[in-house]
Image (cartoon, rainbow, N blue to C red):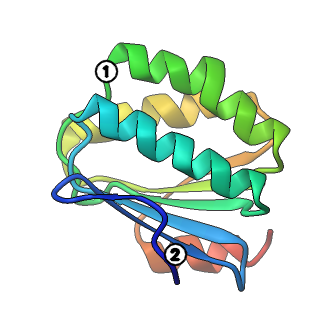
Amino acid sequence: MESFYQKDGVVETSVDLSNQSMTVKWSSLSDDVAIKECCEAQLEQVKGGINKLFLDVSEAQGVPTQERQDWFAQTLFPSFADNGMKAIFTILPKSAITKLASKKWTKTGAPFNFDMFDVASLSDAQELAKEF
């Protein structure tokens, strides 16, 4: 696995070419600049053939701004769809507030031509991803 974006205390990423997936592990969802930069880096991975995203927010604190949530719906998710994303697997957070935000982006992504799943663990996501 190879990292493609990182910000200490906020997010770590990796890409696995063997199964065309990327893993994004968030610690904080309060840094709006990092969220946008990381999502743009994810889009570049999708453009390069990555088609599965393991979005690990299990330990994350905070929530994306409403403006960023709108950007997911209007810009990021359509671009993911246009460039071949097949599935996004959200590893659910322990924080109740963060969980509400994750439910919102899962609902926002539902209309696009990729699947969105909520799962309990990264291993559950990886197992489910074998179907794609």
Q: Amino acid at mark 2?
A: Asp
Left or right of residue 129, residue 12 in this image: left
Percent from the top left, x then y, of residue 2?
51, 79
Task: Tell me the crowding category of disc 2: few under 14, some 14 to 19, or many 20 or more residues within 10 angstroms, Cα based.
Answer: few
Percent from the top left, x then y, of residue 47?
76, 51
Give SS at disc 2: helix
Q: Residue at x 79, y 73 (%)?
A: 131
Check the image and report above or below for 68 versus 84. above
Check the image and report above or below for 96 versus 112. below
Left or right of residue 43, residue 27 in this image: left
State whether residue 24 appears in this view: yes
Check the image and report above or below for 98 versus 55. above
Check the image and report above or below for 75 versus 119. above
Q: Which residue is mark 2?
A: 124
- What's the CA distance linking mark 1 and mark 2? 28 Å
Q: Earlier in the sequence, mark 1 or mark 2?
A: 1
Left or right of residue 90, residue 126 in this image: right
Residue 65: mark in rendering: 1
